[in-house]
Image (tube, rainbow, N blue to C red):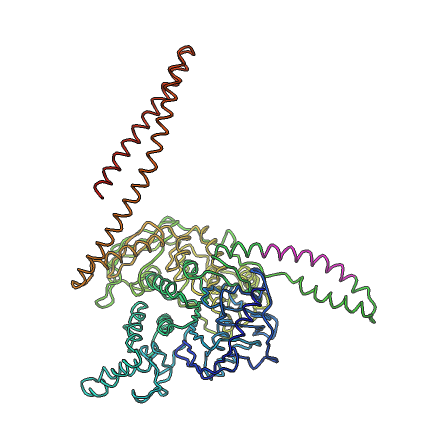
Amino acid sequence: MASKTNFLLAQSLNFILLGSFCCFSNVFVVVLCFQPIAPFAVYHHPLSNTLLHSTVDTATDESPSASILSGPPSITARDLTCSFDGGDTYQLQSASYILPRGARVGLVGRNGCGKSTFLRILAEACGYGGNNEKARDNVPFTGEVECPKDVTVAFVEQEPPSPSGITVSDALLGVTDTTQTSKGVSSGNISVYEAVRQYRIASLNAATDPDAFAAAATLMDTKDGWTVLTKADEVSTKLRVKQLENQPLSSLSGGERKRVALAAALVREPDVLILDEPTNHLDLAAIRWLSDLIREKKKMTLLTVTHDRAFLGDVCSSILELDRGSFYTHEGSYATYLEGKEERLANEDKAYSEAKALYKKELEWMRRQPQARQTKQKARQQSFYQLEKSTKPRVKDPSLELSDEGQRRLGGNILKMRNVSLSFGNKKMLDDFSYDFNKGDRIGIVGKNGVGKTTFIRMLTGEQSIDSGTIDSGETVVFGVYDQMGIPFLDEEQSCLDFVKERVEAGSGKSMAEAPQEAMKLLKQFQFPRNRWPERVSMLSGGEKRRLQLLSVLTKRPNFLIMDEPTNDVDLDSLRALESYLEDYQGVLVVVSHDRSFTDTVTNHLFVFEGNGVVKDYLGSLSDYAECLIEQEKKDDTASRPAGDEEKAANTEDKAERVARMNSIKKMKRDLAKIEPLIEKLKTKAAELQSSIDSSSDQGWTVLADLTDRLNKVEAEIEEKELEWLDLAEQLEALE
């Protein structure tokens, strides 16, 4: 009932969104025009046959197509249906969801289920793509998405675009087409972001054109552009794109474009932030900063797809699962979601078994019936077809249960690095590093982006030559490298089955006759259903391509496994299965990852790349190291305070000392209050024991000795408590 009540409340808003949408890089902002006509801006996809106005169905936490409302909705999606193969597989099937304002929602589901598709549908309805019909054609869906007039939305894609002619500085301010920007700075219709852009341009030519610079500065005052400029500088610095501001987007790597797109969205401070794998290509410090920023924005609504369970736990208070075209809401943490999902699947399995038994009986009845059926028989026939749909088994969770012979034997001499150094120009990547890799080593490679982590693993495999030192690899070592850049698909038109057959023939030594059977076996193990085998690799989702890449690596049966950001774009079910496999892996494992939960699970020590070629062996988890970083940053902040802030810092420290002193006083008084009655109780007990001793002279030596021993212990405890009381009293007197 709550869902229906809140929906009707939202309908009472008598405004509609009219106007246009502005697309900047992959950040999308609504250009608002208020008019009291209708309650929502309704995006009705052209493939829909009807515009639905019915209320959202009431549902419980564990029912599909439901959301728990905590306020007016930010976005309402109703009756969404999407299929890319004509209906054989549905990414969305009559699915509805209401995103409440202020909600922090993590969207989960297995690779290829339609998570990114759903985000793109929402973003498109809220301005994504503008008039770009090509973008719309990529997501063939029916249904409607409603967005209240006062809501602005920003969307960061999994793989952001890179429009030509746009610099990073432009993208941070929402510019996607420089030919469409304002020609002058005096226009009253100019946006604050364009004002900041014009000011930046004018500041470069301030010496030659001071009048233009003065006009730009005045406009910055009028539009409050200084706040935006400060925000842009802060965000670009934290996400490490400040140094890229003058570079064109088209020249950046995928990771750099992702950070620019994320920065651009955060500069806009939208009401709704939609993120698709936001932690990809971010280091530990950037992930922590992003988590803190999202938590600080109490009013901002978040909908995110992420594989990073630590990030998910930090920023999300509810989980939305997309499973077989339907939504399931789970309030609480990811751990709570797993418990709820297990219970739901158990109930589904029970219902499936019951439906299957009934289906067999009804099937026999159908076969016995004559061709001409009466009305009652036709009604039962319709029920039979409905029952037939419910007997379709659900997709099982992924499993990486590889055979025992999957790993090659590893000899005693594995890999030795002696005094290895490497520099690129004046930049040291590795400085006099030595280490002997041993069987069972499980090493996590961590450090800021650009300090040489990927270069290091290229040294291990011999792809990167070194300046000095030696790297000796054993004869039995077979490397398996999972590259963060993804798998090289030389033929995008090649089918999944043909791709795996080639890898089987090349990597495992199987014959041409054996390869097809082995390939089909591997595809099943890695949860590629039979109807996906003939699918072109170019049509796979990002997560499915990653799963195919992992299959390709493990086909080599490596005993020295190197994984560079293996959790990127991998769904959480597959991630848990991968963790389970790696926990039993007997070879050498080297993992480059910023995913705290994953790295904590599969590694037992870290190589910390600190920069300038320095690498330290840290015996602990990535979470422990992250805490150490926080403490170190606090110390660095204190040490780097400007001289002018000394008085302020001293006042802050004095206040902190006063608070600490008062807390200590309160604690001591509480402890004293606890000790005093305890001493009185012990004295009473001692008096009782002394009385028993005085009256037990005729009860024998054994009883007397026992009472005396008990009295001595009580008196010793009294003395201990009295000393403790005196010590606390002296400390309290000194503090007061």
Q: Is residue 134 above or below residue 468?
A: below
Q: Relative to the observer, which residue lies in front, 567 or 99? A: 99
Is 45 placed above or below 696 here? below
Question: Which residue: 57% across, 66% down?
Answer: 65
Q: Nearer the viewer, residue 603 or 630?
A: 630
Q: Main secondary structure of the magenta part?
A: helix
Q: In the current view of this chain or complex, which residue is farthest to the top?
A: 698
Quadrant that contains the N terminus: bottom right
Q: How many marks?
A: 0
Q: Is residue 502 magenta?
A: no
The percent position of residue 610, horizontal first and vertical second, equals 27, 59
Q: Quarter holding the C terminus?
A: top left
Q: Tell me where the magenta segment starts and ends, as one range.
A: 344-364
Residue 38 at x, y percent in the picture = 53, 80
Residue nearest the viewer, comparing 717 with 443: 717
Say if residue 74 shows up in the picture. yes
Q: Report the front residue among 565 and 337.
A: 337
Q: Is residue 65 found left or right of 306 in the rendered image?
A: right
Residue found farthest to the left:
643
Q: Relative to residue 306, is residue 290 drawn left or right?
A: left
Find residue 521 and report its image quarter: bottom right
Which residue is rendered at x = 25% and y = 86% of the image? 215
Q: Magenta stretch containing residue 350, yes or no?
A: yes
Residue 568 on image: x %, y %: 42, 64
Q: Is residue 506 visible?
A: no
Residue 369 in the image, given as x and y percentages of width and height = 82, 66
